Amino acid sequence: MSEIILEVSNLDVFYGDLQAIHDVSLKIEKGSMVSLIGANGAGKSTLLTTIMGVNKPKNGKIFWKGQDITGLSTNKIVSRGLTLTPEGSHIFEDMTVRENLQVGSWTNKSREAKADAEEKVYDIFPVLKEKRTQLASFLSGGQRQMLAIGRAIMASPEMIICDEISLGLAPVVIKDIYASLRKICESGVTFLLVEQEVKRCLKYTDYGYVMVKGGIVMEGKCSELPEDKVSDAYFGIGEFA
Ligand code: ATP
């Protein structure tokens, strides 16, 4: 097994009395594309926000490159090289495309590093270069997601966590976005992608975790996970009822 970049160990997370995450563990290999599959309310966003330091776990640990980051602030976690694109992209509509990108570059201290990161974004998403002086409010749904990913790249991360980047996008746009993610992955960035669609995860990512009611019920290499079994787990039917 190659180097583990992110490890979550026996995590329990509560909102008041409600336990949203039950004893969740996962290990993500450096340089891989991993998916977290689950229906509405399965606990995916809670897991991501806990990894990013927004929610504090009641039990369990989170290790980044072997170091315990449980309870660290989000700022510190992003500074260490782990970043998140939230569900719904959350771009700033009244700022230009370029200004939106620059918001993401606060962890890069030198002007040179900021310029390099911006060039990398334009290289992956040429349409953002074309539209860099336009207001972000004029972007299409797919371009907004590209901008959200671009903003994450501006922090020169080693790993990007994406929360439902395909939500509401046409299949042809999703295909393009996944092709771009694979390109970014090949440049050395690890991905954890949260998805609701089983087929898409199995097609585009290397390793998958299936989450149901706050717990991981199945995991494996996507090439070896049978789609019907993952679907049964996802819907809580068959042997998973
Ligand atoms: P979705 O795909 O709809 O975003 P999800 O898999 O990301 O779903 P979460 O949003 O993590 O799931 O929700 C997990 C559980 O925690 C759900 O029962 C939800 O109602 C509950 N929950 C989420 N956020 C809060 C909160 N801020 N306060 C209380 N309960 C919450």
Image (cartoon, helix red, strand yellow):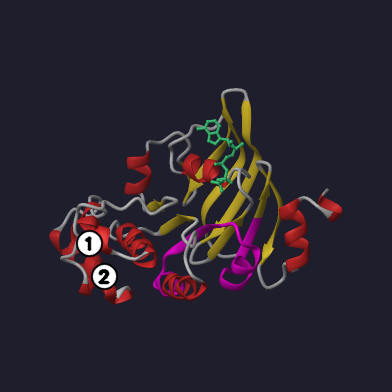
- Sooner in the amino-acid sequence: mark 1 or mark 2: 1
Q: Residue furthest top?
A: 17
Q: Quadrant of residue 194?
A: bottom right
**Residue 205 spot, x, y in % from top left:** 57, 68
Q: Which residue is mark 1?
A: 97
Q: Quadrant of residue 10?
A: top right
Q: Amino acid at mark 1?
A: Val
**Residue 98: x %, y % from top left:** 19, 62
Q: Secondary structure at mark 2?
A: helix
What residue appears at the point 39 percent right and 59 percent down from the top-left corner?
158
Does the residue at mark 1 contact the one at mark 2 (Cβ under 8 Å)?
yes
Residue on which the image places disc 2 = 128
Taking the image as shown, residue 52 lies to the left or right of residue 213, namely: left
Q: Is mark 1 within 8 Å of ligand 1?
A: no
Q: 13 or 1: nearer the eye?
A: 13
Q: Would residue 140 be found to the left or right of residue 20 on screen?
A: left
Q: Is residue 233 left or right of residue 180?
A: right
Question: What range of the chain is rendered magenta?
Answer: 182-209
